[in-house]
Amino acid sequence: MKSSEMPITEEKFGIVFRYSRANIYSYHSLIGALEISPFVSDIPVFIPKPEEIIPEINRLLDVEQFTHLLIGISLNTFQLQDVLEFLGSLKSHPKANQLTIVAGGSHPTARPGDLLSNGTDIVVNGEGEKTFQELVLALRNKSPLAQLKGISFLDEEKNIQIQPRNEPIDLNDYPPFAPEMELYSAMEISRGCKFGCTYCQVPSLFGKQVRYRSPETIVKWGKFLLSKRAVWDFRFISPNAFGYGSKKSSEPNIKKIKQMLSGLKNLEATNKKRIFFGTFPSEVRPESVTEEILELTRKYCDNNNLTMGAQSGSPKILESIRRGHTVEQVIAAVELANNFDYIMNIDFIIGFPEETEEDQFETINLCKELISKNCKIHMHYLIPLPGTKYEKMKPKKIPGEILKILRRWSNDGIIFGSWQHQYEKVTNQKNGKN
């Protein structure tokens, strides 16, 4: 169905998400947004496992007699091929005319045509909570898509129509997960990033204006979680956890962070609760690591490690990729964290197109120094992502000597991560292999 009108005349309407662990934060936020909408909260939502989604669609159409289903897909670039195969199975479905396929996430936002030309009916651009609420209502009410913001679709001439986005939402107006369906997960405490690193999709997806969920709102949802679970680990989503509540995004706002952490710490729990702050799925920036913030996290939190982005050991590359910090700040943050008995998990990326062999050796040398300071290195090979500076550029090849070092470190457990798979994938693509 490829029309700017997209008429839907069916009476029994449902939503099926292609639910997967890799995208749970997106799905939970979207479902939570539907739950609080007075206009669409009554629409049933189904979350089968990816391998069970086709049988579930068949069951809903044939047994439960749903007359139309919205199929929701959230994906990033690494998931594109799997999703395209899934779209193929939907296009050949005997009741394909009863399906409306909606995709969102980082890849569809940057390259809507990749989805729209392969069977997707509508793409949600950028953050989805408000837009998805409005889209579901429009589909149920048979309203024209052209009246909506924040979506892309094909018009009658098969041209891509990209609508202006909605205004950024206030995170406090939406739940951080889906409480009605009991889909609980880490809480997103900030959205957006002002730094605009050249390899990262976050600014194009969520903007450079950083928004925060308030300490009061976070504690409120923390209390809710503890009323539902006897044991709970509080984890958070943020590009820079230590920048929470800060106007500058890099300097810790000790008052706001203390208000949040102490509020969660003081909540009563039936059995056990723990707080993990500055660890995956968030990280911290080197310049935000201060003695005051480490004293605070040691007092209120349970993690003995922190995740920090360094990305390169070359000052030239750090400037080129607009990281906004120095090599010296990386080392200083590690040494300070060591004083508080934190183990640092540090992210690095190798293969930036502008890297020279000397730049890569500087990264290797910094890794050696940090390893000697009890750090764990999380190594990545650059994947040029849509919507970034490197989208159409080739990553730099890793020289043989550096490749040997990285492989030896991986085999010895000194570094971890998917860098070898990423490197082989890009190399195979250059050689014309799948």
Image: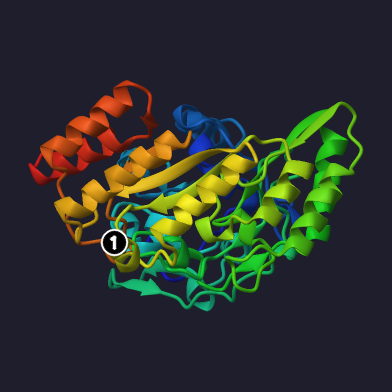
In which quadrant will I find the C terminus? top left
Q: Amino acid at mark 1?
A: Ile
Q: Would you place residue 386 above or below residue 308 in this image?
A: below
Q: Residue at x 27, y 55 (%)?
A: 384
Q: Is residue 68 visible?
A: no
Q: Would you place residue 263 above or below residue 88 in this image?
A: below
Q: Of 146 and 96, which appears nearest the observer?
A: 146
Q: Is residue 176 visible?
A: yes
Image side of residue 268 versus residue 287, left or right: right
Image side of residue 325 versus residue 294, left or right: left
- Residue 139 appears at what percent x and percent y? 56, 62
Q: Would you place residue 115 above or below residue 434 in this image?
A: below
Report which residue position mark 1 lands on: 317
- SS class, disc 1: helix
Neighbour class for label 1 at 10 Å: few (<14), some, many (≥20)?
Answer: many
Q: Of 404 and 380, which appears nearest the observer?
A: 404
Q: Residue at x 63, y 56 (%)?
A: 290
Q: Residue at x 53, y 77 (%)?
A: 147
Q: What colour scheme was applied to this rendering of the protein? A: rainbow
Q: Residue at x 30, y 28 (%)?
A: 409
